Amino acid sequence: VQLQASGGGSVQAGGSLTLSCTSSEVTLRTYVMGWFRQAPGKGREFVAASTRIGSNVYKTYYGDSVKGRFTIPRDNAKNTVYLQMNSLKPEDTAVYYCAADPAIKGSDYATEDEYDYWGQGTLVTVSS
């Protein structure tokens, strides 16, 4: 399964950017979806996840560094999951990856090894 991530770019600190993640192979509606990022010289960091808890009802989770600034909405009609990023900071500069998995237990949504499918990454650069 291939995921296509897009929407990266350059933005000034305090600005906003929205990333998109879609698939032409599977319906993402039932998948656990996650966003991770990797800054230069650092490991991959959990950013956000969305898990299905009912018909078109999702629970969302966020990494501590992005809580209150990022959200992970879905548009099931477009088979797309977004990462809405507000109040961006220079430390948000990274390559952002979307990930998907049919099922993840408990709190493992923040663990990159739990995800079977990954997008190619999209670069976000935030300047001060």
Image (cartoon, grey):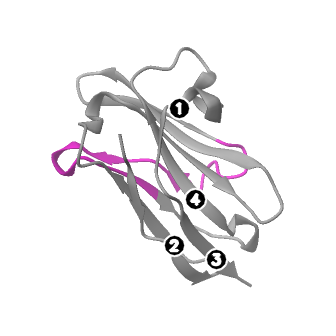
| Residue pointed to by mark 3 | 125
Residue lying at 83% horizontally and 62% vertically, measured from the top left: 41
| Residue pointed to by mark 1 | 115
Q: Is 61 a magenta residue?
A: no
Mark 2 secondary-structure assignment: loop
Which mark identifies residue 16? Answer: 2
Q: Is residue 98 left or right of residue 30?
A: right
Residue lying at 72% horizontally and 44% vertically, measured from the top left: 64
Position of 37 relative to 10 (above/below): above
How many tags in the picture? 4
**Picture quadrant of residue 103:** top left
* Residue numbers of the magenta segment: 63-83
| Residue pointed to by mark 4 | 96
Marks 1 and 3 sit apart, C-alpha to C-alpha, by 25 Å
Mark whose residue sits in front, 1 or 3: 1
Marks 3 and 4 sit apart, C-alpha to C-alpha, by 10 Å
Three-letter code for the amino acid on which mark 2 is drawn: Ser
**Picture quadrant of residue 50:** top left
Three-letter code for the amino acid on which mark 3 is drawn: Thr
